[in-house]
Image (spheres, grey):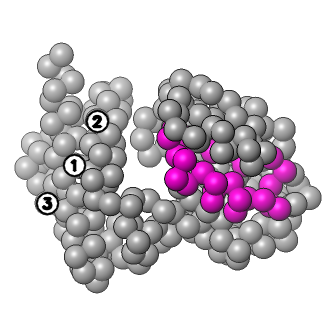
Amino acid sequence: MNPAGISAVIITKNEEDHIEACIKSLQGLVDEVIVVDSGSTDKTVSIAEGLGAKVYVKDWEGYGANKNYGADRASRKWILSIDADEVVDEALKQAILEKELHEGTLYLINNITNYCGHWIRYSEWRPAYKFRLYEKANTRWNQRKVHEGLTHQQTPKLEKLPGAMLHYSYTDYDEHLAKTENYARLSAEQWIAEGKRPGMLKRIFGPSVRFIKSYLLNLGFLEGSVGYRISRTNAMQVRKKIQYYDSLKTK
């Protein structure tokens, strides 16, 4: 265990296929695992409890809100935020165990995605550093419906950690499409909540620009057919977000 004291926080709903590997990767690293479940109908809760996690059932209020709920129930000073379909690799585990954590610092962790059995190196899903380890007292997740981020009471120091979180995203394309649909709807709701609207240029060129960015600028073509599928679906999400926006605004 890191001497600074770390609680892991995981938000879940119907994650029985992933939650065991996630929690086991945290064993010997964190002092406690907090699971905030939003009404799973599968074995997620029983698996998590069987592995020693503290499980809280809470209605879904958004990614940031539910992560904050879990952090508020954590007993340790530091929070490691991890998704149910992610695992900590050994290099990251050792880095955190050996790290002296400093107040006023946000720690970034490399996130590497496995898509339908394929590790992604390019496209918009290329390995990227994300804020995952933070002080409970001075840091909160914002209330965005999607793409939530951390806010800090003061301008923090940023530090990257060695190793990675391995993200096992989708096992098939149907699962990817369903998640894309959900994200598009939530993103449209976020637009409305922020008083934003898609302009004419966004409507005409938005999907194409998203595809070009993912497939060409971020070298998604080097992933072959997988890179094309990811880039095409990213473009589709932009189009669907606009469609959801129009539908919600007319209600």
Q: Amino acid at mark 1?
A: Val
Give x and y (percent) for residue 12: 55, 41
Number of the label disc, if any, that sits on residue 157: none
Q: Secondary structure at mark 3?
A: helix
Does the stretch in magenta take in 29? yes
C-beta proximity under 8 Å, tags 1 and 3? no
Task: Decide if residue 15 is on the left or right side of residue 76.
Answer: left
Residues packed near mark 2 inside 10 Å, few (<14), some (14 to 19) or many (20 plus): many
Of pointers 3 and 2, the one earlier in the residue sequence: 2
> What span is in magenta?
8-32
Any part of residue 34 in sight = no
* Quadrant of the rendering where the N terminus is positioned: bottom right
38 versus 128 height, above or below: above
Q: Nearer the viewer, residue 9 or 210?
A: 9
Give x and y (percent) for residue 68: 64, 34
Q: Amino acid at mark 2?
A: Arg
Of pointers 1 and 2, the one earlier in the residue sequence: 2
- Tag count: 3
Give x and y (percent) for residue 86: 57, 59
Indicate the quadrant where residue 73 lies. Answer: top right
Number of the label disc, if any, that sits on residue 208: 3
Any part of residue 30 in sight = yes
How far apart are labels 1 and 3 at the CA level? 9 Å
Task: Decide if residue 189 is on the left or right side of residue 236.
Answer: right
Q: Nearer the viewer, mark 1 or mark 2?
A: 2
Residue at the spot of label 2: 185
Number of the label disc, if any, that sits on residue 238: 1
- Residue for point 64% across, 54% down: 20
